[in-house]
Image (spheres, helix red, strand yellow):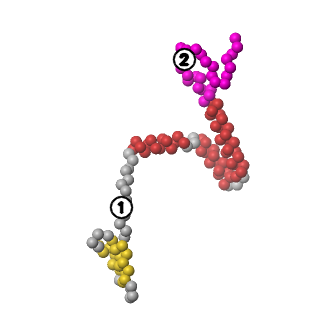
Amino acid sequence: MVDNGSATKHGARTATVNLPFVTAQFHAPELHLPHVRVPDRQEISAALRTVGSYLPSPRKTVYYGGLALMAALELIDWPVAAAVAVGTAVAGSGQTRESSRQEAPQQRQPTDGPATPPRGRRPKKQ
């Protein structure tokens, strides 16, 4: 005979199984879970913006996905796909550094003080 859901003095759910030589009684454990605060809409959008800043652009995602697909379909060997991906990433990171260096002087505001040449460059001889 099985008795499911009978209440005890604590209100916990129990199950009793009566067998010819043994009677087993099972108690559901009492769980005390901590209160979890639900984030609001601004916190969720800030988290999504942060995650999005670390993701590659859609164009790069399609490029690397295409490389992975070609390697999965064995159109190219996976070491070749990995080498192409690493080479592209290294070339792209150097390109973004160079473009940021070229844009930096244009963004500077003129000052009234003496002009100093950028670091690593010598002033032009006149």
Which residue bears the numbered disc 2?
110
- Figure disc tally: 2
Report the residue at 37% width, 83% height from top: 23
Looking at the rendered structure, the secondary structure element under dot 2 is loop
Image quarter in which the C terminus is found: top right
Looking at the rendered structure, the secondary structure element under dot 1 is loop
Q: Is residue 97 above or below residue 59?
A: above
User: Is 60 in front, or is 83?
Assistant: 83
Q: Quadrant of residue 100?
A: top right
| Amino acid at circle 1 | His
**Along the horizontal axis of the image, is 55 left or right of 33?**
right
| Amino acid at circle 2 | Pro
**Residue located farthest toward the top when viewing the structure as drawn:** 126
User: Is 91 in front, or is 34?
Assistant: 34
Q: Are marks 1 and 2 in contact (CB under 8 Å)?
A: no
Q: Which residues are magenta?
A: 100-126
Is residue 113 in the magenta section? Answer: yes
- Residue 99 position, x and y percent, is 62, 30
- Crowding at mark 2 (Cα within 10 Å: few <14, some 14-19, many 20+): few
Say whether residue 75 is visible. no
Distance CA(mark 1)–CA(mark 2)? 64 Å
Report the residue at 70% width, 55% height from top: 74
Report the residue at 71% width, 51% height from top: 79
Image quarter in which the N terminus is found: bottom left
